[in-house]
Image: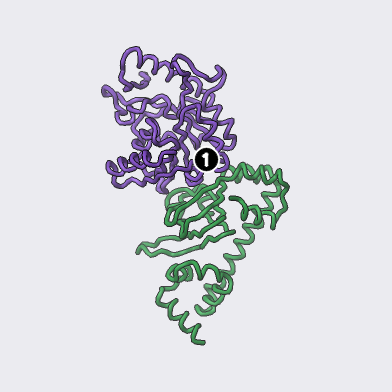
Chain colours: A green, B purple
Amino acid sequence: MYTLYFQHFNSKVRLTEEEQELIKSYLTLKKLRKKQYLLQEGDVCKVIAFVEKGALRAYSVDENSNEHIIQFGLEGWTISDLYSFLTGEPATYNIDALEDSELVLISKSAHEELLQTMPKYETFTRLNITGAYLAMQRRLTSIISASVEERYQDFINLYPHIVQRVPQHMIASYMGLTPETLSRIRKRISSK
Amino acid sequence: MKTMQTIAIIGASGNMGSAIPRGLAKGNYRLLLCANDLDKVQTVAEEIKSSHPGAEVAVSDCSRDASWEADIIIAAVPYSAEREVAEKIKAVANQKIVISIANPLNDTYDGLVTAPDTSAAEELQKLLPNAKVVKAFNTTFAADFATPVIDGKQADAFVAGDDQEALQTVVELVETVGFNPIVAGSLAVSGTLERMQLLLIQLNMKNGYNWLADWKILHH
């Protein structure tokens, strides 16, 4: 139920048994069935979710009802609408489950209490945010400076497991391409 | 809130346990009806679906799995079964709202089995120290859920708990059912609410209210 969460935690900051038990008391376990929402646009995002099992996506919807995938969340990843979580403003993202999923959630109040009372949790959070920032920077650099072929190649090298689990049209959405364009790129790559 | 919340009702084959989801079916909730007798609870689910075709209703015979899936857990079981339920759901109830509806009546309905300085709700909180226990739906009879307006007056329903956000969420549930919610205070007020219902049960039996009676505070 918490296996991956604490593996991830301990890989960044080592916890004692007692500290682990203390943190557990602040965490919420939640199961989500495929297609169920963790968050819908317009609600305030009250949790950060760690994926123990399954797959989720965060996406925005534009005026023409097109979905734009911002982030995937697979086992061992964290997913949230961080802007809404931190500011208390309504969320601009929707987060739903692509597969039946098991999550470890931390609420805003629990998160803040742990940040204040437990230096190890603060370190863990800082390392997580730093990691997310670097991933975001890499994604941004790739979008503005690499060719679509390079971007797709980078994506499958970095996240080979996503390609196997997520439908192609969602990967196209994540890359900001139409499914047709992505399909052409894949053909071109495979014929090389 | 747009995001659909999942509510697990443990003991959904019972009188109160089936009345509560019937009352909540018009809200934006996914209802997980949970009981040992799956056939019985399946019948309740089908009734709800036929009267509210849009309702999201599922059944389960595992209170632990249902509570794991849920955002809110309603322990619609008698006081005597609270301990057993708490043991089953303890690992998955951390930080979740757990609603205590029980009135800890004795067998002859003329007193409570709890000590004077505690309540069914506070005892449940002790069993689930990391959950947000809220007292609600204990001052309303099962029949009131079908008739939340009695004799032209909307029945009051009292809510007590220590977590403000959890209280607000439960107030919304009470409103969805159709009662007028009144936040009575902290969880320590639960004992008073449970004794109020002891009185109403005694009056019901004495005066023949036919289990359709409720509280209403008259005020300026």
Residue under circle 1? B96
Residue at 57%, 47% (x, y): give it.
Answer: A106
Kind of residue indicated by mark 1 = Lys
The picture places residue B172, in percent across and down from the top left corner, at 41, 36
Query: Above or below — where is A125 with respect to A144?
Result: above
Residue at 37%, 14% in the rendered image? B203
Find the residue positioned furthest to the top. B206
* B211 to the left or right of A171: left
Q: Position of residue A11 (x, y in %)?
A: 69, 58
Mark 1 secondary-structure assignment? loop
Question: B123 or A149, which lies in front?
Answer: B123
Protein chain holding label 1: B
Left or right: where A121 falls relative to A93: right
Which residue appears at 42% of the width and 70% of the height? A169
Which residue is at a point 66% across and 42% down the rendered structure image?
Answer: A22
Front in this rendered view, residue B95 or A66: B95
User: Horizontal and vertical percent for residue B90?
Assistant: 56, 39
Q: Considering depth in this image, is B54 or A145 the residue closer to the camera? A: B54
Task: Classify 10 Å Cα crowding around label 1: few (below 14), some (14-19), many (20 and above).
Answer: many
Left or right? Give the position of B170 relative to B220: right
Horizontal and vertical percent for residue A84? 50, 51
